Image (cartoon, rainbow, N blue to C red):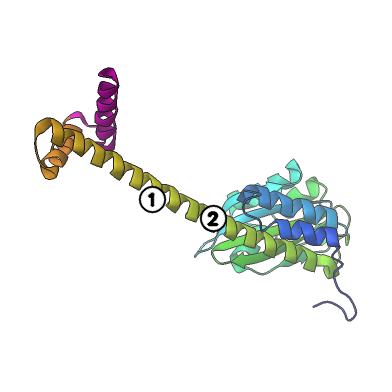
Amino acid sequence: MNPVGFEPQISSELAAQVARLGLVHEASATVALRRVTELATHTVQGCVGATAVRWSAGRTSEPIDQVGTHPDLAYLSEIQCARRAGPTFEVATDETPVFCADTLAETRWPDYTPLALQRGVRCFADTVHRTGPVIVTLTMYGVSPGALDRRELDVGALLAAQGGAAMSNTRLYEDAHRTATQLRQAVEARSVVDQAKGVLMHAMGCDADTAFNELKRISQTRHVKLTAIAQRIVSGHRAEGLGHR
């Protein structure tokens, strides 16, 4: 909860950038994650770098994508995912934010804090947001004790939330696009098979069922997909027709 009279300062420029995160045609999930970390670094006071991870929601959270604004910070994120331990992993699992004002005095993650200190991290904050099946964690880092102000972490939470919405939108868009592609391919396959049946019916003087059974027989004998056989028959018929002109 924010102290009385304090509200996170969100500029019009930041608002515009946050809104852009939700435009699925502008970015992939990974690009949207990277934008979240860049915006956190540029807008959260005391934040010199950030990492973000997209997790699958379930019994156990599994990392899908992760990005960082600096290789050292990306390493800290990756090592936690690999070891399945550390503040970021706990935040993804419990879906509860954590805050560390001074890494040197931190005792909750004895295996992680030495690695963070070696890379100059003296404070950090992890926020998390779930949008449907998508969990996004955002970790912000400071280089001096107390550099990150708890009161400004709502901005980080906002970015994680909008990043999660962008991930979900991207997933829905990709699912819809995949379904549309599959339907189009199915229609195209049905069309070429029907054309091939017509060619065989004319050539063999048979009905549609017999022509289709012949297509299946050739497909099984040659171990070639039925649609590929149909396409060859149709292409060969067209080439023959052109040759007689």
Q: Which element carries disc 2, helix, strand or loop?
A: helix
Q: Position of residue 45 (x, y in %)?
A: 88, 59
Question: Per the image, is 114 magenta?
Answer: no
Closer to us: 80 or 40 = 40
In the figure, 15 relative to 63: above or below? below
**Residue at 88%, 62% in the rendered image:** 146
**Residue at 29%, 32% in the rendered image:** 231
Residue 151 sits in quarter = bottom right
Rounded to the nearest angstrom, the CA distance separating label 1 from label 2 is: 15 Å
Q: Which element carries disc 1, helix, strand or loop?
A: helix
Residue 232 sits in quarter = top left
**Residue at 74%, 47% in the rendered image:** 73
Q: Position of residue 83 (x, y in %)?
A: 59, 51
Closer to us: 102 or 27 = 27
Looking at the image, can residue 79 be seen?
no
> Which region of the structure is painted magenta?
222-245
In the figure, 9 relative to 35: above or below? below
Kindly identify which residue carries mark 2: 173
Kindly identify which residue carries mark 1: 183
Q: Please name the amino acid that badge 2 sits on.
A: Tyr
